Image (tube, grey):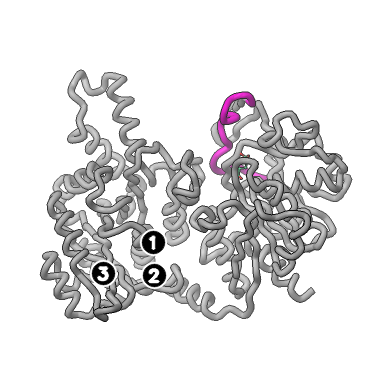
């Protein structure tokens, strides 16, 4: 069977949950035994979100192949349970980049290079390529809102694709907002009508309208939207607000959305098996206890910056039948004086990844507090760096220990930039220039790690060889390895060639683990990441000990 394409656009305003809607549709089709893939097309000019400030853009999600992508890809992986790759995310910047490269190479044979057809052809190519494994369905989410100037080439490309691929192989779903006017006590359809009009003005007639609203749409209201927007009455769906994002697939299912999609695209859909989603929602709503986890970070006002982390902690809770209360602690506000009052109520402390010196001394203080007070501690990437620096300063008695990222000429660079290392994933020798502005290229994507027998990490994973995703430049400095080990730090995970330290643990502590990689990217609601599962378990045990 040829891959069928579902294009998801958004209208009225942003933040309606288009990514979650696309991911939920993917989950539902998968539950009907279909092979599904998803792609996000982002209209901004950045080639990828790697250089974007998390304050503005939220988390940068990293895939196995080392792509720095939009955070919606995290939702796709979590809902679909399948890994994403570079080809699942393109931006206007990346599309223009390849068009301009082709132009410079002379591929256009001296022709005038234009948005139509050259840019739109490039977009159509990447869209068609996403179903490369012969998936039954490819869901393509167009970022931004209909009417944005930046999004127009993408919309034009998907308009053309209907004739290129055949009507029976393409479906357009438009997500809009149906606001509830409290004063009038009614839902308003006008913004939806306008947004659909906008879409039709560029030649796209939606097949399905998905209406985000506070309350369910009545049949009368659906009929009205259907009439004004020229869609079938039973192709208008409520996407009503839910208190938990993992309820969205079941909500859509109850509305009959996936069934309608299957009919419209003539998909050979089996009856869905949604038992795992039901089980998940049941577990979320029937927790047997609660743990308080402190996230000591920099972006405490913008939790989107820690999206996957947040979800991975929820998954860890689900695996232990516990609700997880997240307490964001601003690292910059921590001082030796207020440490105890700020952190003592927490059952577990997590220091997440990050870049730059701001807040690092607070993270170092927090990891020291967790170590001394025997509070379960989980350090991720910069969190591992903080824990290592703290241990060096206070246990190894190296008061000036630091990371090369913060103090380039530290006398004790316990975390440093490896100027030369063998990159097993890309199979080449990587060289970095410490004096260059950005300190060289990052270690990105999936790398293998061997776990030491008897360690907490090994107990969590239950196997020796693991693969985890990275996004950093600095590493544990192995010159100090023996000194750390002599004082009770276990280097429990290393690269197979033993040059890179990937996991550290502290002995004589209930659970103190730091990892150089980002385990949160691989956690799944149906199967929590082993480190998050065990961290939450340790936090629970800490309550009763
Ligand atoms: N800033 C640190 C580095 O580049 C840590 C990065 C991270 O936490 N992802 O090595």
Indicate which label's residue lies in the foreground, 3 or 1. 3
Q: For numbered disc 1, what is the local secondary structure?
A: helix
Q: Which residue is mark 1?
A: 20
Image quadrant, ligand 1: top right
Cα–Cα gap, marks 3 and 1: 17 Å
Which residue is located at x 28 percent, y 66 percent? 177
Q: Is mark 1 within 8 Å of ligand 1?
A: no
Residue 444 shown in magenta: yes
Which residue corresponds to the image point at 61% horizontal and 36% vertical from the top-left?
473
Q: In the image, is residue 499 part of the stretch drawn in magenta?
A: no
Image-quadrant location for residue 428:
top right
| Rendered image: mark on residue 248 | 2
Residue 65 is situated, as x and y percent measured from the top left of the image, at: 49, 41
Helix, strand or loop status at disc 3:
loop
**Quarter location, residue 424:** top right
Pick the residue in front: 340 or 165: 340
Which sits earlier in the primary sequence, circle 2 or circle 3? Answer: 3
Contact, mark 1 vs mark 2 (Cβ under 8 Å): yes
The reply to whether residue 345 is visible in this rendering is yes
Which residues fall within the magenta stretch? 434-449
Of tags 2 and 3, which is closer to the observer? 3
**Point 73% across, 49% down: residue:** 364
Where residue 458 sits: x, y (%)?
71, 55
Q: Quadrant of the C terminus?
A: bottom right
Q: Which residue is mark 3?
A: 178
Q: Is residue 352 left or right of residue 119?
A: right
Tag 2 secondary structure: helix
Q: Are marks 2 and 3 in contact (CB under 8 Å)?
A: no
Earlier in the chain: of badge 3 and badge 1, it is 1
């Amino acid at each position: 069977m040829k891959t069928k394409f579902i294009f998801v656009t958004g209208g009225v305003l942003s933040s309606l949950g288009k990514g979650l809607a696309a991911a939920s549709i993917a989950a539902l089709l998968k539950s009907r035994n279909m092979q599904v893939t998803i792609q996000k097309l982002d209209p901004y000019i950045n080639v990828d979100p790697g250089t974007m400030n998390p304050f503005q853009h939220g988390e940068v999600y990293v895939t196995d192949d080392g792509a720095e992508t939009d955070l919606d890809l995290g939702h796709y992986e979590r809902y679909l349970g399948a890994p994403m790759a570079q080809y699942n995310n393109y931006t206007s910047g990346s599309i223009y980049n390849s068009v301009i490269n082709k132009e410079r190479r002379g591929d256009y044979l001296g022709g005038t290079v234009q948005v139509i057809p050259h840019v739109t052809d490039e977009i159509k190519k990447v869209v068609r390529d996403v179903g490369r494994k012969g998936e039954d369905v490819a869901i393509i989410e167009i970022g931004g809102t209909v009417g944005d100037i930046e999004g127009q080439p993408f919309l034009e490309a998907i308009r053309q694709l209907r004739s290129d691929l055949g009507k029976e192989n393409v479906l357009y779903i438009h997500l809009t907002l149906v606001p509830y006017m409290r004063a009038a006590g009614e839902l308003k359809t006008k913004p939806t009508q306008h947004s659909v009009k906008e879409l039709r003005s560029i030649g796209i007639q939606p097949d399905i309208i998905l209406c985000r609203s506070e309350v369910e749409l009545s049949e009368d209201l659906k009929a009205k939207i259907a009439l004004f927007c020229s869609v079938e009455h039973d192709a208008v769906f409520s996407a009503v607000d839910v208190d938990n994002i993992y309820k969205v697939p079941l909500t859509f299912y109850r509305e009959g959305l996936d069934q309608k999609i299957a009919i419209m695209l003539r998909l050979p859909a089996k009856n869905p098996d949604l038992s795992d989603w039901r089980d998940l929602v049941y577990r979320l709503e029937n927790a047997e206890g609660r743990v308080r986890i402190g996230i000591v970070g920099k972006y405490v006002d913008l939790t989107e910056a820690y999206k996957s982390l947040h979800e991975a902690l929820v998954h860890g809770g689900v695996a232990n039948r516990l609700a997880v209360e997240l307490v964001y602690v601003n690292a910059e506000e921590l001082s030796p004086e207020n440490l105890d009052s700020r952190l003592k109520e927490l059952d577990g402390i997590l220091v997440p990844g990050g870049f730059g010196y701001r807040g690092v001394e607070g993270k170092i203080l927090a990891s020291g507090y967790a170590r001394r007070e025997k509070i379960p501690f989980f350090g991720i990437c910069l969190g591992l760096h903080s824990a290592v620096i703290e241990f060096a300063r206070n246990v190894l008695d190296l008061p000036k220990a630091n990371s090369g990222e913060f103090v380039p000429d530290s006398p004790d660079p316990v975390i440093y930039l490896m100027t030369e290392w063998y990159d097993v994933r890309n199979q080449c020798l990587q060289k970095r220039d410490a004096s260059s502005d950005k300190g060289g290229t990052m270690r990105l994507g999936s790398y293998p790690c061997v776990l030491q027998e008897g360690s907490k990490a090994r107990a969590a994973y239950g196997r020796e060889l693991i693969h985890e995703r990275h996004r950093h430049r600095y590493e544990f400095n192995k010159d100090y390895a023996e000194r750390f080990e002599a004082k009770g730090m276990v280097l429990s995970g290393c690269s197979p060639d033993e040059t890179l330290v990937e996991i550290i643990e502290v002995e004589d502590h209930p659970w103190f683990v730091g990892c150089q990689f980002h385990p949160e990217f691989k956690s799944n609601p149906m199967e929590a990441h082993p480190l998050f599962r065990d961290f939450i378990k340790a936090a629970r045990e800490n309550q009763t000990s």
